[in-house]
Image (spheres, rainbow, N blue to C red):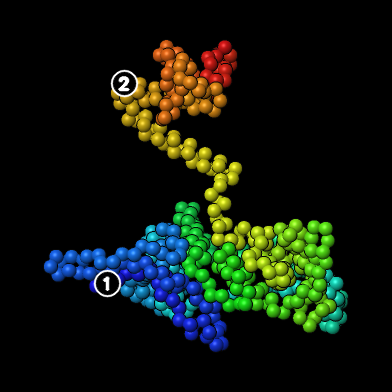
Amino acid sequence: MQRFVCFRQGYRLEKWYTLPNRKREPKTETRTRCEAQFQVKFVGVTRRWHVTQFLNVHNHELLEGRLSRLLPGHRSMSKAEIALMNNMRKSRISTSQVYALLASQSSYFNKLNYGPRDMYNQIAKARCDIPEDVGDYEMPVFCNKWQTLVEEFGVEEKEWLNEIYEKRRSWATCYIRGKFFARFRTISRCEGLHSLIKKYTKPHYDLSEFIENFQRMLGHMRFREFYAEYESARGVPVMQTCIEPLEMCAADTYTREVFLLFRPILVRLDAMKVLDYQTRDNSVIYYVCRYAKPTNVWVVECVDNGNVITCSCMRMESFGIPCEHIISVLVRRDVRKIPKCLVLHRWTKKAKESMSEPSSFTSELQASSRLCILNECARMMSEVACATTERFHETRDLMLDLYSSYKALDEGNMPSKPGLGGGTDPKGLVVGKSPNVAAIARNLVIIKLLVQSTMKMLSVHKVALPVKLMKLKSGGEPWD
């Protein structure tokens, strides 16, 4: 007898929640005591496997089909791949390069049933770094500290130091506060991209080799994004703060990486205190400070019953993540969910859903792609249809009927009732026309196409003809 269960069956033991001196981030909570299972039994008489139990009721949301191949039960490295990886690492080839080679052998990254993390698990070198929050000063405090630092080291006359101070509005946190830059303070991301390109391209590559390896690099980057999306959709992080409702809301809303940036803010919430508040016409102003430091006060304003919330530190405007001052006010107001005004859409799990709406640039690309596809389809159809006269006439009539009906729809003068003017059948073809009218319209379109093709051919051979002879009116009418 064999029993197959859901990957979220069972529960995590209590001891894993209360480990002392925890240094690493707890693993994602994936167990929900799901009872879905599939049980089979081998019957010796029939020598077949028979289904004895089947429960298909899950107590959690199911992963999308495209993400299921990254489930732990589906991820595996074969013995041959593990041996190849170990041999290549002995030759001082990095793990990322080994992964790229295995992906190339499997027709790019989307064909592999495992990710880089599984390779690092095989060699026991997984590491995880969580960035810390960026501190800053107010403008007067920054200027005083800069002046004190310059006088302490006696570098008042250093020209380069004075130039840096003159450019302080471009790099000092107190001056760029309120300007959104998504936590990027240096060119490290650009340098990281350059480093990744260097792994896949070399200076001696010709154009075809460069394009091929550049496509491999793009495949690698897309797979990392795909894997990060899977990590955000798989399971729920272990709650570690006393503000569990807000922490759970952040875990359900933000991606995994952004959530790991938001949780330290909840941890620092214990050191924050709301001193006082004032009520105005349509807003409430709160004064927040740190514990035992009443001189440093931040002002949090809630407008329109919490629909708009701002803080004087402007970290929400700079990073797109609520600061501890705003969170302390939310706790004071007993708010259980993060308001929508404090959630930046680009940091959420559903950020990519809005990308399905094509922009003007995307629409132009789609129209260009459709044009190429239709041209290829027309070429293939022409090769087959021109073999016999019957095929030629049938294909020509169908194409011209489609052209006439689509043109009439675009111009908005398609008759709603079938009759002499014609209507459309479910396939979009013009129906209900008088045979004579349809034939005349078809012939006019044919003449127009022939004239246009003749003009194009004559222009190629630089043959000049009277312009009046070649002029066509709009709407498919004959020339003057």
**In the image, what residue type sits under mark 2?**
Thr
Tell which tag, 2 or 1, sits nearer the viewer.
1
Q: Residue at x 47, y 56 (%)?
A: 215
| Quarter holding residue 272 | bottom right
Residue beneath the point at 36% across and 62% down: 56
330 vs 196, left or right, is right
Q: Secondary structure at mark 1?
A: strand
Above or below — where is 379 with respect to 176? above
Q: Position of residue 43 (x, y in %)?
A: 17, 69
In this view of the protein, can residue 230 be seen by the observer?
Answer: yes
Q: What residue type is disc 1 on?
A: Gln
Q: In the image, which disc is placed on residue 389?
A: 2
Q: Which residue is mark 1?
A: 2
Residue neighbourhood size for the residue with mark 1, other residues' Cα within 10 Å, grouped as few (<14), some (14–19), many (≥20): few
**Which part of the image, by quadrant, shows the C terminus?**
top right
Checking the image for residue 404, the label placed there is none
Sequence-first disc among 2 and 1: 1
Q: CA distance from mark 2 to mark 1?
A: 65 Å
* Circles 2 and 1 in contact, beta carbons < 8 Å: no
